[in-house]
Amino acid sequence: MAAANYIGRFAPSPTGALHFGSLLAALASYLDARAHNGQWLLRIEDLDPAREQPGIKADFARVLDAFGFEWDGPISYQSDRLTLYTSALHQLHEQHRTYPCSCSRKEIQQRTGTHQYDGHCFNQLPKANRKLATRLHCTSGALCFHDRIQGTRCHDLQQESGDFILRRRDGLIAYQLAVVVDDYLQGITHVVRGCDLLNETPRQIQLQNYLDYPSPCYAHIPVATNPMGQKLSKQTGATALDITQPSQQLFRALQQLHQSPPEELQRADVNTLISWAIQNWQCHNIPATEKKTAPLPE
Ligand code: GLU
Ligand code: ZN
């Protein structure tokens, strides 16, 4: 793989339209990449056809384009890359890092009172005549990493979540495996994304360690919330980005990222705003958490 100084990415899932929270993640990762003269890739994480909103994938490029984003190379789709994930799974299997699991969510809940996996099938054979998931056996003890915004974080995967799924019982590849394989094969050096994925990061680092992949540098930005303090997401019904007024929302997003865009850029077009933002990008201005909920654009 060609060594590059900086390759970043934006990796939306096509489960719903891009919203203001997606714009923040896209913008922070884009500005950080361009301010480092880096590349920025667009990857669609479409591993779960049942959760996909029809037609939305094609919309992503149109919306990002309207907001002035320019990605490098062709858009990649995880649904095209299944053999790559299967071979990583095979590699982990050969290293005895994985094991089959027949437990349903309900069984886990009944045994543990939580969703945390108790290692049941690590210690005994899975039930016969059941569909099997594949789990990764995690290390216990502190796994630490440094985040450019959140600082140093340490997690004990066994204590916090237990062995996690790489391939579901219905055969679908889990997000954790796909994201790690793609970040590696696409040469991603820097991941900038929402804080909602911060707790997923130690699991991804565990996989990178097992697969002997280098870990990218991580930066997790505070997530946007609605006036009720709920995380903006497709599940909380966040409003889709309006491509008829991109500059207004970009300006607002720059403020939310604590980049202090000058007032005179309020009415600037997207290209002017983006160029200003690349030249003046200050990742360290972003706080680890948002103290008060800023009003969102209509
Ligand atoms: N596809 C994930 C999402 O939309 C993001 C993956 C990532 O940035 O690692 O939440
Ligand atoms: Zn099990």
Image (cartoon, rainbow, N blue to C red):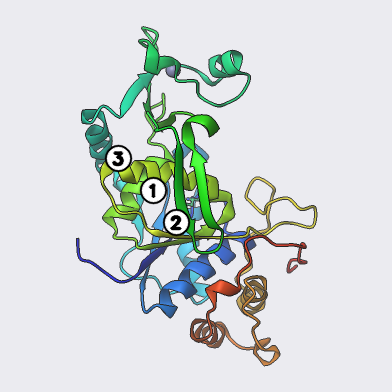
Q: Is mark 1 within 8 Å of ligand 1?
A: yes
Position in image of residue 262 (x %, y %)? 66, 88
What amino acid is found at the position of numbered circle 1 in the picture? Answer: Val
Q: Residue at x 41, y 28 (%)?
A: 168
Measured in 3D between alpha carbons, the distance from the residue under mark 1 to the one under mark 2, in whole angstroms, is 9 Å
Number of residues whose C-alpha sits closer than 10 Å to that of mark 3, classed few (under 14), some (14–19) or many (20 or more): some
Q: Is residue 224 left or right of residue 23?
A: right
Q: Secondary structure at mark 3?
A: helix
Q: Residue at x 53, y 50 (%)?
A: 198
Q: Is mark 2 within 8 Å of ligand 1?
A: yes
| Sooner in the amino-acid sequence: mark 3 or mark 1 | 1
Q: Are marks 3 and 2 in contact (CB under 8 Å)?
A: no
Number of residues whose C-alpha sits closer than 10 Å to that of mark 1, classed few (under 14), some (14–19) or many (20 or more): some
| Sooner in the amino-acid sequence: mark 1 or mark 2 | 2
Residue denoted by label 3: 210
Q: Nearer the viewer, residue 7 or 213?
A: 213
- From the viewer's perspective, is the residue at label 1 or at label 2 nearer? 1
Q: Secondary structure at mark 2?
A: loop
Q: Quadrant of residue 94?
A: top left
| Sooner in the amino-acid sequence: mark 3 or mark 2 | 2
Residue denoted by label 1: 179
